[in-house]
Image (cartoon, rainbow, N blue to C red):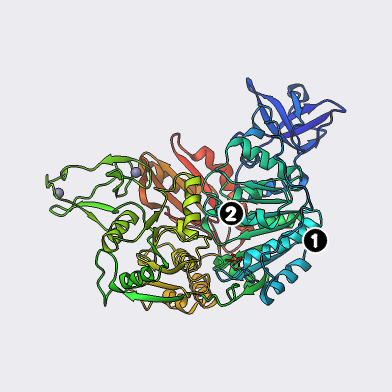
Amino acid sequence: MRVLRVALEVPVAKLFDYLASEGEPVEAGDRVVVPFGTRQRVGVVIEVGDGSRVATARLKPIARVLVDAPRLSADWLEQMRFLASYYQRPLGETVAGALPPRLRSLKPLPRKPKAAAQASGDASRYVAGHEPNAAQAQAIARIGAALGSFRAFLLHGITGSGKTEVYLRLIAKVVADGRQALALVPEIGLTPQLEARFREAFPYARIAVLHSALEDTARTHAWLDAARGDAQIVLGTRLAVLTPLPRLGLVVVDEEHDASFKQQEGLRYSGRDAAIVRAKLAGCPVVLGSATPSLETWFNAGAGRYELLTLAERAVPGAKLPSVRTVDLRAETAQHGLAATVVEAIAARLARAEQSLVFINRRGYAPVLACEACGWAAGCNRCSARMVLHSADRRLHCHHCGAQQPIPRACPTCGNVDLRPLGRGTQRVEETLAGLFPQARIVRIDRDNARRRGELARTLAGIGRGEGDILVGTQMLAKGHDFPKLTLVCVLNADSALLSTDYRSAERLYATLAQVGGRSGRREQPGEVLVQTRFPGHPMYQALIRNDFAGFAASQLAEREAAGFPPFIHEAALRAEATTLATTMAFLRSAAQLVEAPAGLRVYDPVPHTITRRAGYERAQLVVQSSSRPALQEFLRLWSAALPAAAPSGLRWHLDVDPIEFD
Ligand code: ADP
Ligand code: ZN
Ligand code: ZN
């Protein structure tokens, strides 16, 4: 008798036993159809044994084995086990979440499309972009020498230092060895240039591109290409790290500090951390690349766990990092949000036919619509948040739940008809700039006008060719783009992040500013970054001006150590939401008592989120910390087993291990 332990997509932390007949060719890693309740489901065989805790007479046989996709490999299953236990998620849900929807459905897989006639040739043939400079060559040699076994590298290279060239050359080596390379990037939709660059560099390689915006069939095909070993290169967002890769030889995580590597729902994994585990299991090197590494990674490199490789200069000969200057808003009042220095700098670029980028981290027209007579401000009915005024449709939008309302004709409290937009977002800045520079072509890029991927890609490509004089945008414009004619970046409301209570906000702001600043001066003309601020002496701005990431990181790490924050301790958050705050808080308070905390583990008091009400739910969270990772993991294991019974109906909760977002 063979007993199969099968992972099913159910929110219970256990496997289900089924019988396979003797001689039936089914092994761990196979997808099987099994009877479950009154219906059939697709599950994954995790183990094959010869006994069961369930009485044999009650065990049901599987219905059939699915052979339309390759068997999931042992190291893939190992990775799933690791993620499930580390992030406290049932294995069945973890496995299901890692498979494309089609592989968990009873529907047959889509047939392979007739391969578009791909020019045949050597997949490892690399069309060189440039001969590597000395620093690049050194990085390629160090990482290249580590191929074939696990080792973690931090490639710390300023923006434009040629990190991508390093990745591509290493990938060429890996493909020449007959192995697969996995390259993870924060967001593919925003950087279509990157995919194009990979395809140009490897004209004969099969490149599977994977991200969550792909439609079902395309995603299934890309996944199968990777899993069958047909694709030599897999380029994707965090979810690509969950793809089976039978011959994995190298993992690259570009912009490793980027918050989008952390999944914020379901299995709340860090794609970067999962990539390291993956490389370990596959016995291959992993390269984390960034101009502004996360403090966790910087700390690990400092401790010798990762080898640090540095690219300190821009790769294009003559290209320099932009000079960064603060514009002191206490000395110079801003008109409509723009200081005179900034307006003059933009005018100078216009006169020279160069591009400027105005960066403001807030979309919409104005973040507040208020009555100056009584102090009323438009709020969302479902959230404890202000409604944002949008000019395109002249409506109020909630950025937290998506609710919309028409603009009220008068103040609902006092009847005053003179309601004022306060503060500014991208749309209002665009309007102001249009008034100041009527001849200029202004292009605004934020989530409101970039809903369609194709359109965004076209707009970005146009900017790259020099279309548009002034660009206005949010962080969508900060990442990865290469705009040769851009020589000025103006940052409008950076200070708001410095005033945040989140201990990661300074780290994030530094990364964003370095990244957005890095868009300028990528060719011969030097770039300039102007940051409007009321705190020009702030150490974060001072470090940015000196391009002193190491100094900034050291001071941040010293603060984190003194205050007892990661990476010096490890933490997890239990978050809950219910229709009343009393219910949420009562649950969290009782949760804190459920499991006895081991020595050294600290359970903090529950705290409501800054925006407590969202979409009708009152939200709060409770943080646990320990300097011992194993102690924290053991506590979380016991806790997550006890929590389901403690949660009242109607309350939703989840655990977030290594959380990065606190409001
Ligand atoms: P990063 O990924 O570090 O921001 P990129 O790899 O995009 O940098 O390189 C920035 C620019 O430098 C690109 O235009 C690239 O073609 C160019 N480049 C890269 N390596 C070299 C080199 N060795 N010599 C000259 N130009 C290079
Ligand atoms: Zn009023
Ligand atoms: Zn809302």
Q: Residue at x 76, y 66 (%)?
A: 144
- Residue 558: x %, y % from top left: 51, 75
Give the percent coordinates (x, y) of residue 187: 54, 53
Please identify the quarter of the rendering in which residue 224 is found: top right
Quarter occupied by the N terminus: top right
Question: Tag 2's secondary structure?
Answer: loop
Q: Residue at x 66, y 26 (%)?
A: 106
C-alpha gap between disc 2 and disc 1: 24 Å
Density class for disc 2 (Cα within 10 Å; few <14, some 14-19, many ≥20) is: many
Q: Is residue 51 above or below residue 232?
A: above
- Is disc 1 placed on a helix, strand or loop? loop
Report whether residue 249 is seen: yes
Give the left or right position of residue 110, taking residue 441 as reference.
right
Q: Nearer the viewer, residue 544 or 65?
A: 544
Say which quadrant the C terminus sits in: bottom left
Residue 469 appears left or right of 96? left
Q: Can you give x and y, in whole percent of width and height, for residue 452 in the image? A: 47, 44
Is residue 205 shown left or right of residue 270? right
Residue 283 visible, this orientation? no
Snapshot quadrant of residue 628: bottom right
User: What kind of residue is marked 2?
Assistant: Ser
Q: Residue at x 80, y 27 (%)?
A: 20
The residue nearer to you, when weighing 9 against 224, is: 224
Residue where numbered disc 2 is placed:
270
Instruction: Tell which tag, 2 or 1, sits nearer the viewer.
Output: 1
In the foreground, 559 or 594 = 559
Give the vertical position of 361 relative to 66 (above or below).
Answer: below
The answer to which of 641 and 401 lies nearer the viewer is: 401
Q: Which residue is under mark 1? A: 148
